[in-house]
Amino acid sequence: MIYLDYNASAPLHEAAYEAMQPFLGERSANASSLHRLGREARDAVEQAREYVGALMGAGSPENVFFTSGGTESDVWALRGVFEQKSNTERNSLLVSTVEHPAVLDTAAYLSKHGVDVQYIEVDSTGCLYRLPVTKKTRLVSVMAANNETGNLYNLKSMALWAQREGALIHTDAVQALGKIPVNVNQWGVDFCSVSAHKIGGPQGVGALYVHPDTSIGPLITGGGQERGHRSGTLNVAGIVGFGAVAKAIAGKIDERSRRMAALRDRLESQILTALKTVHVLGDLEHRLPNTTLLTVPGIKGEAIVLEMDAVGVAISTGAACSSGSGEPSSVLTAMRLANPKIQGAIRFSVGVENTEEEMDQAANAFIQCVERLLTVAGQIENV
Amino acid sequence: MDHFLNPRNVGSVDGPTGMAENEDCGDVATISLRVDGEQIVEARFQTTGCSGAIACCSAVTELLTGSALQVASELTAEDVIDYLDGLPTDKRGCAKMAAMAGLKAVRDALGAGD
């Protein structure tokens, strides 16, 4: 199988796999326990916190809190801010319309509970040009990189706008981590969500960076783990795996980024040369190095994915289709694209482990698949 | 999956006796027929639909080919689902859309229109 769906989940990195093994076996213990195994587990968690914090540019590792993943981190940041003591002067949440559902659905939830939610519109390439922060804005949430288009957003500039009005800013950097340099201190954000499995760590682990001068209430209450910020027995093996992969890729982000871009460009150029009906969606000047979101208007992305799967290439649609509802991608809908472009969207997301040969094979398979489906759709003559 | 990956009777019949288009959930299916006497001797389809729509249209053309027009006029979505040995729940609408395209083409051939 040629795996080109890294934005969905990256295969487990060898360093993570090896580091996790003892904590799934003979060194398994509760990191809150006082005995030796417990203390060792706690030490391993703290070591991992240092590695993850360093990869995020978090300054002190104490600013990093482990969670169950990117979704929990996003939900915690938003609800944690608004479920603290209410601030009637500042009761507005500002989110972009292309955020992950973890942010958009939480914004909708908060809206039902009295928060004034404002949405920042994007243009047809997914770019946003203004951040309408006001003195009433309590929190801004804009992602660092979009999961579908790969679009990058200028966090540094947005953090300045937010700070100027006295608002807090959260970013979902789940897709950015490991693909481009992430530095929460340089960006100037107050909260940053990351996820282990997008960078080759295990699934079910994430983290939220919280600026030391910022207060946030807990989302999950209970035993008081994570210094009272996030209760629940720590997922030691998962956290250790996250730390191991963070350590393994630290200092190599630029090199990884260049390799991913070269692979992505090789794949993309072959497809665009062969198929004039295919277009690239998003902001081509500012996007993740590993992502290309293509669209073939007139045929269904879902059909392409299944046919590519049958020939051994794993990719994703940009739009979900369940017959009868045909639910479109919220990101592409927010970009106000015509329905055929939304329905025909296909996302390739490569990883550093991919090879040039895989790009050539995947491009060939895609070209044949699209030509066949265009024939079935009656858009090209029978072959 | 076989009828999706290897669809039968893709294309359009030259000089069709009956032809119809059906649209549902943004998908369009076109089925064309050639009739000799009372019997459908050729059925072809084109669709912009998803994997389910492709498989169902392929099944409809197979069910129609060789069938008498009067028998074909009783085609149902259940016939299509049975022919494909079942369909996932979220693809059952595709069977409806394809069967309706087939029925409309049969009615067109019978001269009854829609």
Image: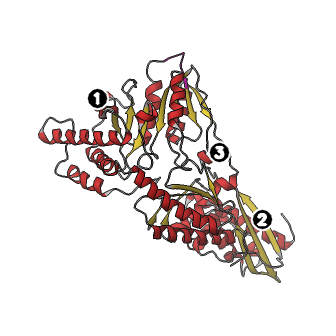
Q: Nearer the viewer, mark 3 or mark 1?
A: 3
Mark 2 = which residue? Answer: B21
Label 1 crowd bin: few (<14), some (14–19), many (20+), radius 10 Å: few
In terms of image quadrants, where is residue B112?
A: bottom right
In terms of image quadrants, where is residue A221?
A: top left
Q: Nearer the viewer, residue A345 or A79?
A: A345
Q: Examine the rendering and report whether any part of residue B25 can be seen.
A: no
- On the rendered structure, is A244 left or right of A171? left
- Mark 1 falls on what kind of element? helix
Q: Nearer the viewer, mark 1 or mark 2?
A: 1
Mark 3 = which residue? Answer: A335
Chain under callout 2? B
- Mark 3 falls on what kind of element? loop
Q: Nearer the viewer, residue A88 or B13?
A: A88
Residue A67's place in the image compared with A179, above or below, is above
Residue at 15% of width from left, 42% of height from top? A37
Mark 1 = which residue? Answer: A227
Chain under callout 1? A
Q: CA distance from mark 1 to mark 2?
A: 64 Å
Range covered by the magenta-colored residues: A86-92
- Mark 2 falls on what kind of element? strand
Please state which amino acid type lies under the numbered disc 2: Glu
The answer to whether mark 3 and mark 1 are in CB contact below 8 A is no
Residue at 41% of width from left, 59% of height from top? A352
Residue at 25% of width from left, 51% of height from top? A20
Q: Main secondary structure of the magenta part?
A: loop
Residue A215's place in the image compared with B45, above or below, is above
Rendered location of residue A115, percent (x, y): 55, 24
